[in-house]
Amino acid sequence: MTTETTAPSRWAHQLITRVRAADAARPWLWDGALTAFWTVGALVDASGGWRNVARDPSLPAGMVVALSLALSLPLYARRRRPTTVLAVMAAAAFVSEASGAFLQAGFLQALPLFHIALARPPRRLLWSFALLLAPLLIGALRFDGEEWHVHVTSALWGYVFVALAGITFRSRRDHTASLVDRARRLEVERDQEVRLAAAAERARIAREMHDIIGHNLSVITGLADGGRYAAAKSPERAAQALDAIGTTSRQALDELRRLLGVLSAPDDAPAAARAPQPTLADLEPLLEGVRKAGLPVVSELPAPLPPLPPGAQLTVYRVVQESLTNTLKHAGPAATATVRLVAEGDAVRLTVTDTGTPPATTPDRGQGQGLTGMRERAALYDGTLDCGPLPSGAGWQVRLRIPTAPPPAHVPVPAPEDSRP
């Protein structure tokens, strides 16, 4: 039943679409065909049928033919210049009504009237009805006497319906154009959202890659330097350094594989397979790797570890990782570090302090992108992060506060202040 009712409407819609496409491609063809059709009809009426309604049937045939052509040929330009066409036809209609010919071709004035209602300002309709009314009045008053209003009223009602049809089509066309414009705007907005999402994803990937590769390479560099100095005096310690380098390299590769696995996982993959990220439980292995690289680290971690959402745990882990990486890079060979994690009511506070070289002697401390990424991570979970030199002038401290409750849906990312690579 549904197919039987929708098939004809679908066929009609396709036919209308094709006709409109053909008209848009060759408007002259449709205008010429319509003008030829009504011109032939007007000339057929001028061959003798006009006398059936004429008030003066004795008018010359040449005059009737000329008036018929003047009422039909201008239709070719009705879409481009409907007001001009109506003025020309109204002049011919005035002669037709005043002479008593009362040619039925006068009703062709409804065609330019329709296009005026369809495409011109509404005030043009007032002038159009003035042009249409003048011939009707002169003919009715001259030949119909007391019944003049019958001829005028019936014709005017026809013109009113034509004008209303033009206004209706215009409203529908404007509504359709509005819908199309809205659809285009929505498409543009969707494209912008896709681009923003892609940019955010690229930033997230870059941040993860920076944390993984930067930290592990710093540890490997420290281990390699220590192994080189120990090779001459203690081959066993050099071998231990090489083992640690191998372990750290494998850990870095494992993290990269997990990151790439998350990126390439399908949308319907299980959550466990899509989010194998470090947690607070991985802090001790991280600190042990840094110690092997030659940086003494004192850790103060609560037992049990505070409950945090998985994303917030990853944020704490990355902040510790980035802070110790920066210490390995910039703090000097005699530096030490302290990592302190404290649960305070509805928030967790992390403090990473080192006793390294004063910032004045390392201009690149506080100028890189690593800390900017840490601030973005903290802001994503409604946390705050700040850093700076210690009051004594020697050493650096990173302070993170992150709530234990889930963050709101959208949290603005604060503008980066002082940062270090």
Image (cartoon, rainbow, N blue to C red):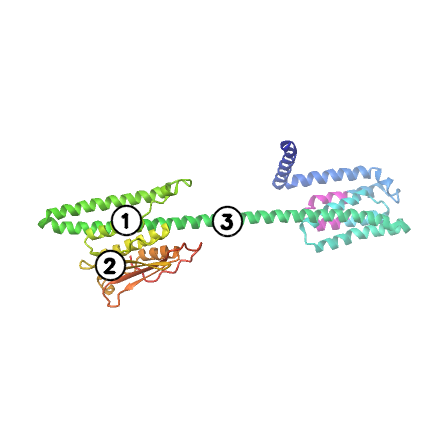
List the residue tagged with mark 1.
Answer: 213
Residue 177 falls left or right of residue 49? left
Q: Nearer the viewer, mark 2 or mark 1?
A: 2
Sequence-earlier tag: 2 or 1 = 1
Query: In the image, what residue occupies the spot 9% across and 50% down?
Result: 233
State the residue in front, 62 or 251: 251
Q: Which residue is under mark 3? A: 188
Dot 2 alpha-carbon crowd within 10 angstroms: few under 14, some 14 to 19, many 20 or more? some
Q: Which residue is mark 2?
A: 338
Answer with mark 2 or mark 3, whichever residue precedes in sequence: 3
Q: Residue furthest left?
A: 233
Say what amino acid the circle numbered 2 marks. Answer: Thr
Whether pointer 2 and pointer 1 mark residues with C-beta atoms closer than 8 Å, the reply is: no
- Judge whether residue 81 can be spotted in this image: no
In the rendered structure, which amino acid carries the disc numbered 1? Ile
User: Which quadrant is the C terminus positioned in?
Assistant: bottom left
